[in-house]
Image (tube, rainbow, N blue to C red):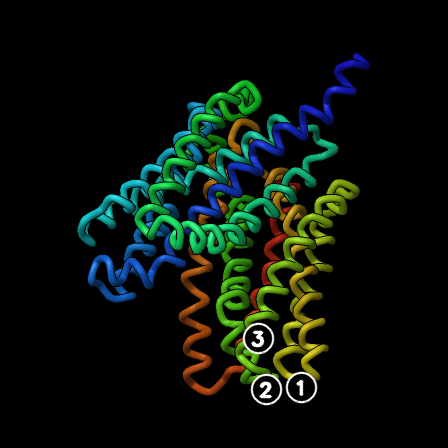
Amino acid sequence: MTDIALDAPRRDARVIGLIGGAHCASHFFQLVLPPLFPLMKTGFAVDFVALGVMMSVFFFTSAFAQVAMGFIVDRFGAHRVLPAGIACLGLAMLGIGFAQNYWMLLPLAALGGIGNSVFHPADYSVLTARVSASRMARAYSVHTVSGTIGWTLAPITMLFLSQWLGWRGALMAVGVIGLVFAAFIASEHSELTTVRHIHPAAKRDGQKSGTAMFMSLPILMAFLYFTLLATAGGATQNFFPTVLPQVQGITLALATTITTAYLAASAFGSFAGGFAADMTKDHDRVIGAGLLGAAALALVIGFAPMPALLVFAAAIAMGFMSGLTIPSRDMLVRAATPPGSTGKVFGFVYSGLDLGSLVSPVVVGALIDNGLTPYVFVFIAGALAATVGAAIAVKHNRQAH
């Protein structure tokens, strides 16, 4: 018994490391193509709109496939699905490196989208099943931070490889690396295998299984939570460089730097939030404090003229407080998930991120075009506050359910 207890931290660390690496790869491949757009534009003789369509195909396919992939993960096991997803991403980039015309890019982008769709249902299934409960929130936080690292590494890596190998060679190189990494993850199947099980209540009540489960109030509220959070996050991450110069009178370069600092602070906040979430069961309170604090700071940034240093500090604090809530968010969803349905539930609720990401650009763009830039921050604050309400509803309806 003592040997088992002593081995648990090492086993947890290995599982968390493998899943963190997979999530890092997922986010890395999401940003492999954009740094190469100027070179691909010339290579395929197309405009940036056409390349944007290619990325839309990638993310739309990922969004729609993610829900279905949750069922596949629960049916066949994450240890089979996860390496297959990484391999799809590697094959897609390898294929784009060889592609001779633009129309070949679209099915390859769809293949990449299918690969990208596996990570949330597979990753959370493994973490939930294999990591000790006392370290679960920290495991979720490492998962989030690993994805951020993937985003950070991609532009630098592709810039270096394209200068060395050309843009086609760069894509072929990361494609091959993806296939090698997929083989490595497949070889670690013993660490990633989850035991499929069906809760007895699910056998007696059809509403506890299948798509009907998504219509239960706790899961619907979790989906709404993710949608609202992505609405606020998309507005912040995508438009900070545009709106900060207008409301605070700073330069575009400084606004871009502040946006980078905001994202870095969010990653640090997520890491700290893992420790906070492991020390409490009141995850809705952590979420409420963090997101309401971030909402208040958004209003301050939007309506209170400040020196550049204070804008910088407020944005860092806003990012940290938002990130602090992410592990508690995942723990809240975990608590609302019926046994044996982790892949399905996380696949479904995480698709809310894609929906929210589609909503915010339209609303924020309209506000800016109509000279209502400060109200972008009202929109962000309102979405964050509504997210708190959704979090409370998840916990309340889960307890009632």
Q: Are marks 3 and 2 in contact (CB under 8 Å)?
A: no
Kindly tell me whether residue 396 is visible in this rendering. Answer: no
Q: Secondary structure at mark 1?
A: loop
Looking at the image, residue 202 lies above or below residue 214? above
Q: From the viewer's perspective, is 170 left or right of 18?
A: left
Say what amino acid the circle numbered 2 marks. Answer: Gly
Looking at the image, residue 334 lies above or below residue 132? below
Question: Who comes first in sequence, dot 1 or dot 2?
Answer: 2
Q: Are marks 1 and 2 in contact (CB under 8 Å)?
A: yes
Image spot of residue 205 (x, y percent): 49, 27
Which label lies toward us, 1 or 3? 3
Say what amino acid the circle numbered 3 marks. Answer: Ala
Task: Compare residues 200 and 373 and report the one nearer the observer.
Answer: 373
Say what amino acid the circle numbered 1 marks. Answer: Pro
Looking at the image, residue 178 lies above or below residue 300? above
Looking at the image, residue 385 lies above or below residue 85? below
Provide the residue designation for mark 2. 249
Kindly tell me whether residue 68 is visible in this rendering. Answer: yes
Q: Residues within 10 Å of mark 2 (few under 14, many from 20)?
A: some
Residue drawn 70% across the image and 31% down it: 133
Provide the residue designation for mark 1. 305
Task: Compare residues 359 and 215 and report the one nearer the observer.
Answer: 359
Q: CA distance from mark 1 to mark 3?
A: 14 Å
Provide the residue designation for mark 3. 255
